[in-house]
Image (cartoon, grey):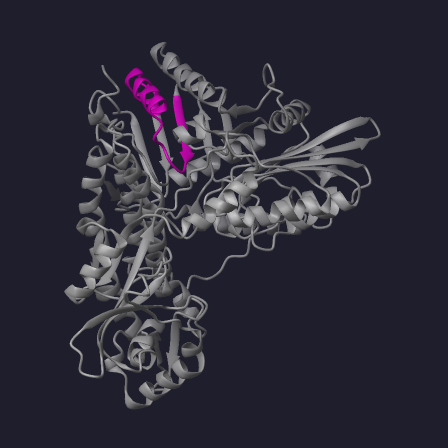
Amino acid sequence: MNFRNPEFYTNRELSWLRFNARVLSEARDASLPLFERLKFLSITVSNLDEFFMVRVASLKDMVHAGYNKKDISGLSPKEQLEVLYGEIHRFVDLQYDTYKELIIPALQENRVGIVEHHEELTREQGAYADRFFAENVYPVLTPMAVDSSRPFPLIKNKSLNLCALLSKKDGSKEVEFATVQVPSVLPRIVELPSADSDTVTLIRLEEIIERNISKLFLNYDVLCAYPFRIMRNADLTIEEEEAEDLLKEIEKQIKKRQWGEAIRLEVEAGIDKRLLKILKKELKVSSEDIYPIVGPLDLTFLMKMYSLPGFEHLKRKGFEPQPVPALPSGCNLFEEIRKGDVLLHHPYQTFTPVVRFIEQAATDEKVLAIKQTLYRVSGNSPIIKALSKAAENGKQVTVLVELKARFDEENNIVWAKMLEQAGCHVIYGLVGLKTHSKITLVVRREEDGIRRYVHLGTGNYNDATAKLYTDTGLLTCDEAIGEDATAVFNMLSGYSEPPGWNKLSVAPLWLKKKFLRLIDREAQNAKAGRPARIAAKMNSLCDPDIIEALYEASCAGVEIHLLVRGICSLRAGVKDVSENIFVRSIVGDYLEHSRIFYFENDLSPEVYMASADWMPRNLDRRVEIMFPIENPDLKKEVMHILDLQFRDNVKAHRLMPDGTYEKVQRGEDERFACQEIFCQEAKKAAKQKKKGGEGGKRVFIPKTSADDI
């Protein structure tokens, strides 16, 4: 059997669009609180923006370069773009159908009105809008006329603009073009006075500007004005081998991102053909890259509405991350970790212990050194502060700041400079590789000698996203893992390549081989009639070598259950190929981000966690780490996490053999939403600990054995 037959694979870009469609399905779900649906619709828009800036842009680059190699699904870059254009246009139509037919009526039912066109304003509202324009907007605007002495202006990436056709008031028939950017420094939505005190009436900033646009061109008549928005190629091209200073090179490339090739033009449907012709010519966009929008451009303003006061009843009840029972408040973390490994499950359990781990190390007199990798951190990161304090306290602090973390480059440059100023030794990653691993090493001198404490995680050291993303982590002082952690940092900071590893598996040289060996072992067990099973959870799956190995294992009789949130190029349930493979995707209140891998191993289960997905970029072009969960109680807990997720019948979608997804049907089964249950369990465990129950021990629900996964 040729398992590389393109018929057995789904194009990764199409698979990603289907993921975004699953997010959109949440916005269309009337059972959800209305303001949560606003958030989901807004997320689909920002997701699609990034998809254009990176993935569509990359395909266009390939076409420009004459690159014709087909992907694993058998499509060339040009063919992928042709397929994507139709899919994206249909998706955008569904976004706006959701907005107009579902969201707007629901808002009106809940006494929230959005004025779609400024012509609809009452006299009182119009007067308010005009005053707001004069006092707040007019001083900020910079109208840009285009003529022989003033060339077409540079339009910034993702900026919302108004374009207009003008004619002089002296009777001249000559028509001129002008544009003005809607300022991002001002609120996108403005509340207007309402006749009914119980009703909130909103208008978008661009409508206020359009209403008053004639005040920007006093000697002209404004013939028409329409909003437009462009998306540019934002995929940085960095020649790392030739760059003398990587930090300076990335700073230079970031500035270019605003002015890259225009790859999408959004215009209001019905735009004057003369205006469209000018935009198309000056921005150099083709017809298929133009998206006429029947509705407001850039629906991300819906996310701003979420913070409107007085609508708590239309939002999901917030959940406060719970304490970790094994780590009591005010405890000495090093003492607790010495008692045994500690498993962390965010956001159900608080991220605070990870922050405290760094903070305590920064002030502990016994700590000699702290080493950490940083990929994405929050805007006001307590971890950065703790690392700086550690350096000021004389600790040896080494931090690898990944400058190539897409769209976080500017933040990471700021952090890198701040850490250097505090006295930390800062590394900018390895040439040609992104360092995506999540690892912290604390070296401590104790009575019985040097001891190494390690945190390993599946998510970033970001205290903000740790409240929104599901991730897992491990705190340990296992000697073998400590030795491996030291080897990782020696590899990152120097040229030391260890001959082998004790327990960690590291990409790009070793991790993929480890996965392939583990999958093959299950296949060999199945062929020999021994118990064989694989269960894995990740963000994306598109590595052809891994998929081929899974197909071979499936044909050997291995039962394979996969939780893949986003891209999945594997086809499940294909006769004689993947009949034993079952794939689900969960889209819920939290972004599923953890990577967990379970291998039956003839009834001696092995459980791993990792920073890596099953993607070529993770396994071949990044520094990633996979680590084992060996403590029997913690292993059961991880198996429990997988079990609950595979049983979800509220937020789960099932991958069908044709590559499409269907929502899991509940039927007669009781409602089972895994994210809600994790919240309940975290509360219960914290309460039991408070009452003096067994510290850190979870009370498992019945289905926790390997057979239940």
Residue 549: say if magenta.
yes
**Can you tell which quarter of the image residue 219 is in?**
bottom left
**Residue 553, above or below 26:** above
Whether residue 451 is visible to the viewer of this picture, yes or no, is yes
Q: Is residue 206 left or right of residue 242?
A: left
**Residue 334, above or below 184:** above
Task: Residue 688 in the image: state x and y as whole percent.
Answer: 61, 49
Q: Is residue 318 left or right of residue 221?
A: right
**Can you tell which quarter of the image residue 110 is in?**
bottom left
Task: Residue 31 in the image: state x and y as whole percent.
Answer: 31, 60
The residue nearer to you, when weighing 555 against 253, is 253
Number of numbered discs: 0
Task: Residue 437 in the image: state x and y as whole percent.
Answer: 54, 34
Task: Residue 501 in the image: state x and y as whole percent.
Answer: 59, 18
Q: Residue at x 22, y 83 (%)?
A: 169
**Residue 217, above or below 486:** below
**Residue 107, above or below 505:** below
The residue nearer to you, when weighing 275 against 508, is 275
Classify the position of the C terminus by image quarter. Answer: top left
Q: Residue at x 52, y 35 (%)?
A: 637
Residue 393: say if magenta.
no
Farthest residue in the front direction? 149
Classify the position of the N terminus by image quarter. Answer: top left
Q: Residue at x 21, y 20 (%)?
A: 576
Farthest residue in the right direction? 447
Q: Is residue 660 left or right of residue 433?
A: left
Q: Is residue 267 left or right of residue 389?
A: left
The residue nearer to you, when weighing 552 against 143, is 143
Q: Residue at x 42, y 38 (%)?
A: 237
Whether residue 691 is visible to the viewer of this picture, yes or no, is no
Q: In the rendered structure, which segment of residues is drawn in magenta?
A: 533-559
